Image (tube, rainbow, N blue to C red):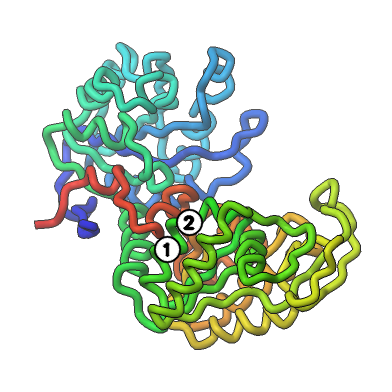
């Protein structure tokens, strides 16, 4: 994978129109942004472009836009207002149903060096997700330089992150956030400091097939927890009761365990499990638990978290690591009683001096909720994108940026 990309530090943007693709896909409830992590993550790149005297044209998608009604609720107007406050400088929102129409062209023509405008949700144009040429050309028509700082959509080839690079003549570079994701996620997997421990959780084996396969080749120890551990346990011939199992993946799990042996890698599975008689409803409702060794799970019970012996086993493995990548919770962490395993792993990661990389999605949410965010080396801003990076796939949004000479 070509991971050495040109960045905002390699270009001169003074007086130039800079189209900067950010990830402002934030939750908005009644016009209020309820989680600003993605906005704050974008600030360093935007400030750099302002200070260098570019004319900064920000763009992003927000949610899925299927209907005309969606266009009323999925506007980026609240993002412009909040960004203005965070930057201490006006970010002018240009409402335009065509995203790049006469309003935008007039606004761009009137820009001074250091000015910032934000375009409307790129998905207001139906071509965006199909990477259609018309919209790519429209976006390119207002810019001399392209900066991609949206890691969260790097695994998709859309107009605003890939198509546009065909038509902008000037350089195509990555912003600081993209660079950080490439450095940590890409290089941790390709050139890790060893011992390298990978921890995978989450409900389904099917979601992680390629990740398991790729990481087994790269890591020294692969730890498997969460719902998908029960398919592995069943493939060893263990009784897993009513636990989540994907019977179509039993052979695959056997194959991976054989692969680990033949490569001389450690593959750790839970040795005990916290069980319930019935899955909690609602998911965070009160629940009675009993813990069993994995050799004696009762047929009528369901495994929902790793047990105390497993917590100790997994935590000890993390202690000696130099690089740890974690993706996916260890149990039903939405329930306070069933979050113990996920909490313990987060705590173990917070106490190690290893480079700790959290691969987006639920693990990122868990680490932040538990207050360990600042103890991790890197928390990925992408869910699907970080998974595909860990699978060793080339991401279109990364590939489209110019390589360093």
Q: Look at 83% across and 64% down and name the residue there.
A: 299
Q: Is residue 110 visible?
A: no
Q: Is residue 191 placed above or below 27 in the rendered structure? A: below
State how far apart marks 2 and 1 are (Cα).
Answer: 6 Å
Viewer-nearest residue: 107 or 403: 403
Horizontal placement of 319 versus 194: left or right?
right
Q: Quadrant of the N terminus?
A: bottom left
Quadrant assignment, res 58: top left
Q: Is residue 98 left or right of residue 55?
A: right
Which residue corresponds to the image point at 22% horizontal and 22% vertical from the top-left? 137
Is residue 202 shown above or below 219?
A: above
Work out which residue is located at the far left of the displayed protein and give it. 405
Q: Give residue 40's position: percent from left, percent from top.
A: 47, 50
Classify 10 Å Cα crowding around label 2: few (below 14), some (14-19), many (20 and above): some
Please state the horizontal and vertical placement of residue 283, each as a whole percent of the image: 80, 50
Residue identified by numbered label 2: 209
The correct choice, above or below, for 117 with respect to 46 in the image is above
| SS at circle 2 | helix
Horizontal arrangement in the rendering, residue 118 relative to residue 248 (left or right): left
Any part of residue 293 in sight: yes
Where is residue 42? Give x, y as percent. Answer: 41, 48
Task: Give the number of the disc on residue 213.
Answer: 1
Instruction: Note whether 179 is above or below 275 in the view shown.
Output: above
Residue 338 image-quadrant placement: bottom right
Within-10-Å neighbours for mark 1: few <14, some 14–19, many 20+: some
The structure residue drawn at horizontal position 84% and vertical position 52%, both measured from the top left corner, is 280
Q: Are marks 2 and 1 in contact (CB under 8 Å)?
A: yes
Q: Position of residue 76 (x, y in %)?
A: 49, 29
Q: Nearer the viewer, residue 164 or 248?
A: 248
């Amino acid at each position: 994978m070509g991971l050495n990309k040109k960045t905002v530090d390699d270009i001169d943007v003074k007086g130039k129109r800079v189209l900067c693709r950010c990830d402002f896909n934030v939750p908005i409830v009644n016009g209020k942004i309820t989680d600003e992590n993605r906005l704050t993550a974008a600030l360093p790149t935007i400030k750099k472009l302002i200070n260098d005297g570019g004319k900064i044209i920000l763009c992003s998608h927000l949610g899925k836009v299927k209907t005309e009604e969606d266009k009323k609720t999925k506007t980026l107007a609240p993002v412009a207002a909040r960004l203005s406050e965070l930057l201490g400088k006006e970010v002018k929102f240009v409402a335009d149903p065509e995203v790049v129409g006469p309003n935008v062209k007039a606004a761009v023509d009137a820009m001074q060096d250091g000015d910032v405008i934000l375009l409307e949700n790129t998905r207001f144009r139906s071509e965006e997700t199909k990477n259609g040429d018309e919209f790519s050309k429209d976006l390119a028509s207002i810019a001399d330089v392209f900066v991609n700082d949206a890691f969260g959509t790097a695994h998709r080839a859309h107009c605003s992150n890939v198509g546009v690079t065909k038509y902008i003549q000037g350089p195509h570079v990555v912003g600081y956030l993209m660079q950080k994701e490439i450095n940590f996620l890409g290089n941790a997997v390709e050139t890790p400091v060893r011992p390298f421990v990978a921890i995978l959780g989450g409900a389904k084996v099917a979601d992680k097939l390629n990740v398991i396969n790729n990481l087994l080749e790269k890591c020294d120890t692969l730890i498997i927890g969460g719902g998908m551990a029960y398919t592995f346990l069943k493939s060893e011939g263990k009784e897993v009761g009513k636990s989540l199992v994907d019977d179509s993946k039993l052979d695959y799990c056997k194959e991976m365990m054989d692969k680990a042996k033949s490569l001389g890698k450690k593959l750790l599975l839970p040795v005990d499990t916290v069980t319930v008689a019935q899955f909690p409803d609602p998911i965070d409702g009160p629940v009675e638990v009993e813990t069993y060794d994995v050799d004696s799970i009762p047929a009528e019970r369901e495994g929902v978290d790793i047990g105390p012996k497993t917590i100790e086993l997994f935590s000890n493995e993390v202690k000696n690591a130099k690089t740890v990548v974690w993706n996916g919770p260890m149990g039903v962490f939405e329930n306070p009683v069933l979050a113990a395993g996920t909490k313990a792993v987060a705590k173990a990661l917070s106490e190690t001096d290893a480079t700790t990389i959290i691969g987006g999605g639920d693990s990122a949410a868990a680490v932040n909720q538990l207050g360990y965010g600042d103890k991790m080396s890197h928390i990925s801003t992408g869910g699907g994108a970080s998974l595909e990076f860990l699978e060793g796939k080339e991401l279109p949004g990364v590939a489209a940026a110019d390589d360093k000479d």
